[in-house]
Image (cartoon, helix red, strand yellow):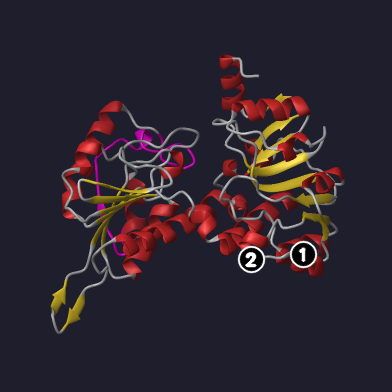
Amino acid sequence: MNVAVLSETVEGEKRVALVPEVAKQLIDRGFKVTVESGAGKKAGFPDEQYTEAGATVVPSSKQAIETSDVILRVTGPNDKEVQSDFLEMKQGQVLISFLYPGSNPRSASNMAKQGITSFAMELIPRITRAQSMDALSAMSTIAGYKGALLAANNSGKFFPMFMTAAGTMPASKVLIIGAGVAGLQAIATCRRLGAIVEAFDVRPAVKEQVESLGAKFVAMHVVTDDAEDASGYAKEVSADTHIKELELIASRLPKNDVVITTALIPGKPAPILITREMVGKMIPGSVIVDLAAPAGGNCEATVPGQIVEVDGVKIVGTTSLLSDMAADASRMYSKNISAFLLNLVPQSEMNMDMEDEIIRTTLVTHNGTIHHEPTRLLVEKDGVR
């Protein structure tokens, strides 16, 4: 089975789908690995390391694609720009990457027309057998950690309590909104830095996890079914519940120096949890780090990709957190995608077993058809071409 690793073409993306160490592991399992020259350079993995691992390095994506059965990427095609390397793919080839088909229905439709079999890494189910493949959680861990460091860096206050000759400096107070993987990692990192942390989430089930990390859980009484889906992910809540959560968040904002938001709803824009009016009631000098900025942001005043100041509050909308930690982000993603590949190709033969929940859930396109139901319905409804 021939596997190709391509350079990322999205502006600012520094990660690579397969690092040399994991490439060697696949080669030892009987795979042939071809790498486009420079694919790992921005993440700190030069061509020489891939060659030493036993991979073949070629000058262009076209050459890598020509000889491959499976193509590995971090980011797949999107509806905002034409990425020529995907146009080079042939019928029957397999693409494994982050795809977000619900946000890129035209790209999904085009892949189906090309006869490409595609799998979306963000759709890995949260089941025990798939934990080693859970790329979304891996990347969220990095985002939560880096977000906490960004918060500390942009705050004008110490995170821990400092006792100095000039007197005692109180510890910073931090509010984490959303206690998923990113939120829990942000809590842990802020606590390690010495901050006093509280966390809010609409899912009562996360209370124990929040408290186990040394943070206070800010509770809101909601029906659990209204707060999370069958996989445990937060889902879009009812209008009444949303009003209540806005009221609760508004009551906590003036009591904290730093706010880190992490709330995302799969396949949809990030929910607004901090309005422009709520920002105006925060303490001047406060900081909001919006980890949902790539999906539009949880704060109404967030500008994705920028740091702005509104009413004396600094709002960090950085969208490059994962690329800023490209080396370790690539290592983690590489292990995720390798585990998925070994499940898909266990004995050098493609295993399209639709009884396998992992394969069935992540499959986006195959044999000219869009298999991801929400995307297929979206394409049919809107007549995407």
Q: Is residue 228 magenta?
A: yes
Say which element carries label 1: helix
Q: Hey, what amino acid is under mark 2?
A: Gly
Crowding at dot 2, Cα within 10 Å, few <14 / some 14-19 / many 20+, comes out as some
Q: Main secondary structure of the magenta part?
A: loop
Q: Position of residue 238 (x, y in %)?
A: 32, 28
**What distance separates the C-alpha of mark 2 from that of mark 1?**
12 Å
Question: Label 2, on which residue?
Answer: 44
Corner quadrant of residue 18? bottom right
Is 253 or 244 nearer to us in this picture?
253
Question: Label 1, on which residue?
Answer: 50
**Residue reaching furthest to the left:** 167
Q: Which residues are magenta?
A: 211-235
Q: Is residue 290 found left or right of 371 in the rendered image? A: left
Q: Nearer the viewer, mark 2 or mark 1?
A: 2
In the rendered image, the vertical position of residue 297 relative to residue 25, given as above or below: above
Is 209 or 158 nearer to us in this picture?
158
Q: Position of residue 219 (x, y in %)?
A: 24, 47
Is 103 or 118 nearer to us in this picture?
103
Residue at (42% x, 50% y) in the render: 318
Q: Is residue 68 visible?
A: no
Is 242 or 343 nearer to us in this picture?
242
